[in-house]
Amino acid sequence: MAIASVMFPGQPGAVADVEPYAELVKRGGAARLWLGQSLRAEAQQVVAYLAGGGRQVPTGTSVTLMPLRHPLQAALEARSMALMTGHPVVAGFGASAPEFVSVLNGAPYERPAAMAREYLSTVRALLDGQGLRGFRLPPLRHPRVELGAGVLRPGMARVAGECADVAITWMTPPSYVRDVLLPALREGAGDVRATPRVATVVHVAPARQGRDAARLAELAAGHHLRAAHYTDMLRRAGLEPSPRAMVDSGLFVTGSAQQIAERLRDYFLAGVDEIILNTSGVFLAEGRAAAISDAEEILTALEDHND
């Protein structure tokens, strides 16, 4: 079943920043609240604070960076989130950029996909009560933890097919998901397990007087457009890695809320199971109130479009 979720479009500096997004999910306006890796307030701790304040909602991380956490800590935090929220959690992990891995480890991963396979398999084993060199987490009843993998290219998609429940993609055009990533996911899953569902983060911003869509796209995705793994993915998809190309191609989705809802339908038709609305361009240009208002307007249009 295709669903629409919302992402907190930044790194939270205060819990009050995230509360309106949690309230939106709690009201049923979005299926899940997603948070990215934060080097300000830690996402898992923000979720715990929200849950303690009565905002217990389905959550996902897109994505927690693998070099920052031992797999044991990752499994412990993921099931803690599920316990505290009372809802299933998508614990998403990504290998990170080689430059950042080098900062932490002294050198990049030689084979990021192989490392991700080992990492994800270890987290899954720990969540399932299996041992890590003789150590097991104490038994704990909690809602299901779905294991997510950040996926941009076929190699990582095959790994996700082998050992993840959810393939989490960013800035991936619908045709690229359909023609490149889904076949690789199916190849990785083979006949052994179900193909992971696909959750895609999509940059969106309703067109309004005075707004420059290319500027919003630069604010939202400029750092990704300068990262080698993203630029390679976009070129494989036939797109130039630039804010203007994102807007012109529809990868940065703009227009009226109704037009955005219609264009987002292409993702569902391509095989995406969950769209994650990201209004980070508006958030950075105009602030929290404008970003949450835009997200809610688009979610309403999506609901009307599906009726």
Image (cartoon, rainbow, N blue to C red):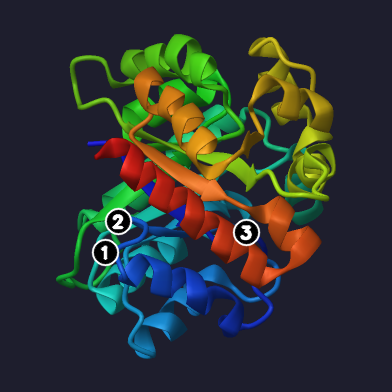
Q: Residue at x 24, y 40 (%)?
A: 307
Left or right: 229 as drawn, with respect to 182: right
Q: How many numbered markers are drawn? A: 3
Give the residue number, with chain letter if any, for mark 2. 126
Q: Residue at x 53, y 44 (%)?
A: 257
Alpha carbon distance from label 2 to label 1 = 7 Å
183 relative to 232, above or below: above
Looking at the image, the residue that sits furthest to the bottom is 53
Name the image quarter holding residue 217.
Answer: top right
Tag 2–tag 1 contact (CB < 8 Å): yes
Left or right: 266 as drawn, with respect to 207: left
Tag 1–tag 3 contact (CB < 8 Å): no
Alpha carbon distance from label 3 to label 2 = 30 Å
Give the secondary structure at mark 1: loop
Mark 1 nearby-residue class (10 Å; few <14, some 14–19, many ≥20): some
Q: Say whether residue 71 is visible.
A: no
- Tag 1: residue type? Arg
Give the residue number, with chain letter if any, for mark 3. 9
Tag 3–tag 2 contact (CB < 8 Å): no
Q: Nearer the viewer, residue 43 or 290?
A: 290
164 relative to 152, above or below: below
Query: Mark 3 or mark 2: which is in front?
Result: 3
Residue 229: x and y in percent read 71, 28
Q: Nearer the viewer, residue 245 or 235?
A: 245
Mark number for residue 136? 1
Mark 3 nearby-residue class (10 Å; few <14, some 14–19, many ≥20): many
